[in-house]
Image (cartoon, rainbow, N blue to C red):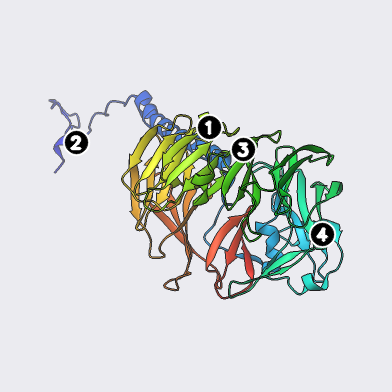
Amino acid sequence: MARGGDMQEVELLDGDEDVAVQPSPPARDRRRLWWVPVGAVAVALSLVGTQLVLDAREDAAAARLAAVPGVFPPLGDELGVLRTISQADATGIWGGLRLGGARTAGILVAPDGSQSFTAIDQRTGDTLWSTPLLGPDADRAASLENAYGGACQGDGTRGAPATVAACLVTDGFVRYEDDGTEERSPATTTRVVVLDTTDGHVITQWEVEETSQLALVGDLAVVGTRSAERGVVVVAHDVITGDEQWRYQEPVDGTLVGSPQEYWGLMAAGDVVAMHDGHGLAFLSPTGTLIREDLRAASRDAGFATDPVTGTFAITSYSSGSARITTLLAPDADPAGDVVLQGEPVHVSVDDGSLPGVVLTYLSHAYAWDRQTGEQLWEAEVQPSYSGLVIRGRVYLTTSTEVLSLDGLSGEVLWRTQLPSYGMGELATDGRDLLLLSSSYDGTSDGAVTVYDLASGDELRTIPYPEGVDDVQLLNGLLVGWSQVSEEITLLE
């Protein structure tokens, strides 16, 4: 039986005509038949075009983020071993100046104890150029491992290659024993050497005292010494000519002179020079004038550093019985520019600049502050670890149990996910995804990289560490694998 939907109306006629012959059905509108497939194609093309636009935008955003200092190279589904090197050879990676790509330069101690300023392509181990600094030294040759003597500073800002290096070159060194003791070998020669990082040629050099400290502040190479006989002497030199620009001296009976064992050092603090010893911090202007001593007490039991992203000098007090307080100094150290915040700064390993003027701290909760005014912008009721990321207006943090994404303007938790079985670790990004670098130092599990979607927090995949690697870091643009049982360092890709 025909279905009702297929029935045709038939007119019965008299006569001999064959009624079995059915009339032809009416012709369909061919324009309608054309519209249906064309409309479907148009919708499909529209969807494809929209997806292409979204993909292009994501690719462009990822490319911009890939250029931000601290961003990992793209990771696949596994980590391969590029090469392995000794800890002595690896000092060029974490202590060297970045020249762009995987190229670094720094003081290299050869097997015979001689020293040179050497540029190396760390991916291959090839030497690009080398400038001799000191000849062979049998004592130094016997102390290639766990020893320190001399170092270089570059003029490059974070993420930018150095063009000039100022090096404190000395044959004196300190060897660190396994039991924590130190064995010092006194210097017979010490000098500052300024070199061009393009080819390593010496620009200028001058002799300094054995106990000298060096800081590169703007276009000045600042050298400081301290002794009971002469007190503290700080001399600033033009980094290109070596000419003395100014000199600062504390009186012999000044309060800065302490025992030789007391810590003594210089460092850049924005545009000024920070001078620290057992009595705390004092600050010298770019022309050598003592401009601040009021922070000595606050900085005695404190941590301090220059933020590599903003250049801000921060002092975090750890005084017993009081909450941790962080003081941010203005670049010129003017007290009127001090901003005092609750908590200690979150170490932001990647900051794409999408939250300008925002400072993150942590204590019992996570906090965001206005850098200029010190106004609290938000407080999130989470207990984060000390490190995090700022990407596309979001803040990424970890707690003891979770990975979190917060809105950078409001502090609202956008997503949260439980830590994987691999446990806690450092957060990182390869520009497209969020990476959790879990170590295996506690021996309870293997280490791995857990990959999350930046937008949703969905776990995408897990990348185990190669055999013999317990932890991974990004140093000078290289993935460096560490082992708890081996002295070798593994470079990964």
Q: Secondary structure at mark 2?
A: helix
**Residue found at x 37% / y 54%:** 399
The residue carrying mark 2 is 6
The residue carrying mark 1 is 335
Mark 1 crowdedness (10 Å alpha carbons): few <14, some 14-19, many ≥20? few
Q: Secondary structure at mark 1?
A: helix
Disc 2 or 3, which lies upstream in sequence? Answer: 2
Furthest-front residue in this view: 253
Q: Secondary structure at mark 3?
A: loop
Foreground of the two, 220 or 432 = 220
Task: Identify the amino acid type marked 4.
Answer: Ser
Mark 2 crowdedness (10 Å alpha carbons): few <14, some 14-19, many ≥20? few
Does residue 1 appear anywhere in the picture? yes
Residue 178: percent from the left, percent from the top?
A: 60, 75
Task: Identify the amino acid type marked 3.
Answer: Gly
Mark 3 crowdedness (10 Å alpha carbons): few <14, some 14-19, many ≥20? many
Residue depth check, mark 1 versus mark 3: number of the one nearer the observer: 1
Q: Is residue 272 above or below residue 131?
A: above
Residue 211: percent from the left, percent from the top?
A: 73, 56
Disc 4 or 1, which lies upstream in sequence? Answer: 4
